[in-house]
Image (cartoon, helix red, strand yellow):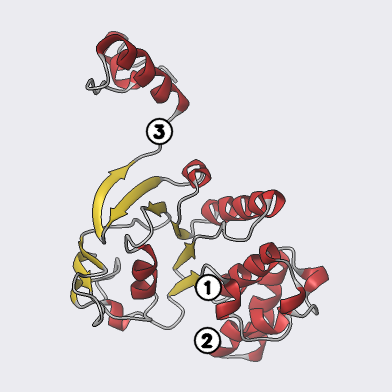
């Protein structure tokens, strides 16, 4: 994304941008920020629901966002019911492959693979509206994954999830990472820091911070040096200092 701006006619200020952001293939990025910071607008723009007002969005092959094939981006929305059309689990999961696939065999293969991957077999004939919020999220994720997208966007996936459902979701997200799926998680829950390769912070639609995960050792080192030098001190990481003292020997 290069100098991307998204504006709504009813708002004086852009909802997003100008934003410069690059996501690597296979990367898991956690995008966070206060309500109204542009996270959902970012998801809507990348998934093609709305178009950028200005700027350029291209993929690794140099194709503009308007040239991306259908199903290129998969978006699991905050409320999964807003994107569910099928009556039963299997029917909803199969809709994407039906739309995108060339043959019935491909539809059957992709639908069965998604249902199996997300452990939805016992629920395949259940009516979607009878499921808990956690399982509705899993059905939505399976339906998106069945489309074989290059990027999956999860918009505040922790919404409506209890503890066990949240743990299941984190496990499945980790599995998606292990298979090289590019992921963007939008939300506030700090638990996503544990699965993200990088954290991007937005505020009023613009980038304000981009950081790698902070480890427990880094936090302990920060607290130690802050106690010595005060809150204004910004220390190097413990690994940087260890490398300076003992070259080639990491503190980790």
Find the distance from the CA under tag 2 to the CA under tag 3. Answer: 40 Å
List x then y, in percent, for residue 141. 59, 68
User: SS for tag 1?
Assistant: loop
SS class of the residue under badge 3? Answer: loop
- Vertical position of residue 235 compared to residue 191: above or below: above
**Is residue 222 depicted above or below 33 in this figure?**
above
| Camera-nearest label, 2 or 3 | 3
Q: Name the residue under label 3.
A: 214
Q: In this view, does 206 lie above or below 85?
A: above
Quarter holding the C terminus?
Answer: top left
Figure quadrant of residue 212: top left
Q: Do the residues labelled 1 and 3 touch (CB within 8 Å)?
A: no
Q: Among all residues in the image, which is located at the extreme right? A: 122
User: What is the C-alpha distance between the residues marked 1 and 2?
Assistant: 10 Å
Left or right: where 247 falls relative to 149: left
Residue underneath mark 1:
148
């Amino acid at each position: 994304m290069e100098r991307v701006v998204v504006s709504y006619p009813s708002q004086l200020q852009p909802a997003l941008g100008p934003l410069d952001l690059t996501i690597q293939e296979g990367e898991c990025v956690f995008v966070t920020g206060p309500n109204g910071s542009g996270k959902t607008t970012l998801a809507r723009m990348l998934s093609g629901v709305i178009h950028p007002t200005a700027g350029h969005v291209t993929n690794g092959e140099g194709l503009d966002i308007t040239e991306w094939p259908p199903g290129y981006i998969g978006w699991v929305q905050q409320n999964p019911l807003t994107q569910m059309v099928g009556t039963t689990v299997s029917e909803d999961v199969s809709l994407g492959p039906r739309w995108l696939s060339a043959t019935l065999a491909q539809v059957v293969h992709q639908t069965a693979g998604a249902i199996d991957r997300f452990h939805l077999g016992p629920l395949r004939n259940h009516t979607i509206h009878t499921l808990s919020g956690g399982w509705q999220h899993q059905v939505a994720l399976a339906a998106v994954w069945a489309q074989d997208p290059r990027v999956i966007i999860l918009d505040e996936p922790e919404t409506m999830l209890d503890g066990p459902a949240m743990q299941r979701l984190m496990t499945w997200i980790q599995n998606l990472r292990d298979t090289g799926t590019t992921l963007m998680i939008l939300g506030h829950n700090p638990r996503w820091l544990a699965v993200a390769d990088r954290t991007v912070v937005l505020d009023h639609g613009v980038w304000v911070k981009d950081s790698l995960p902070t480890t427990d050792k880094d936090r302990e080192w920060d607290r130690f040096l802050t106690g010595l030098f005060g809150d204004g001190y910004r220390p190097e990481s413990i690994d940087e200092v260890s490398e300076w003292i003992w070259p080639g020997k990491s503190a980790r």
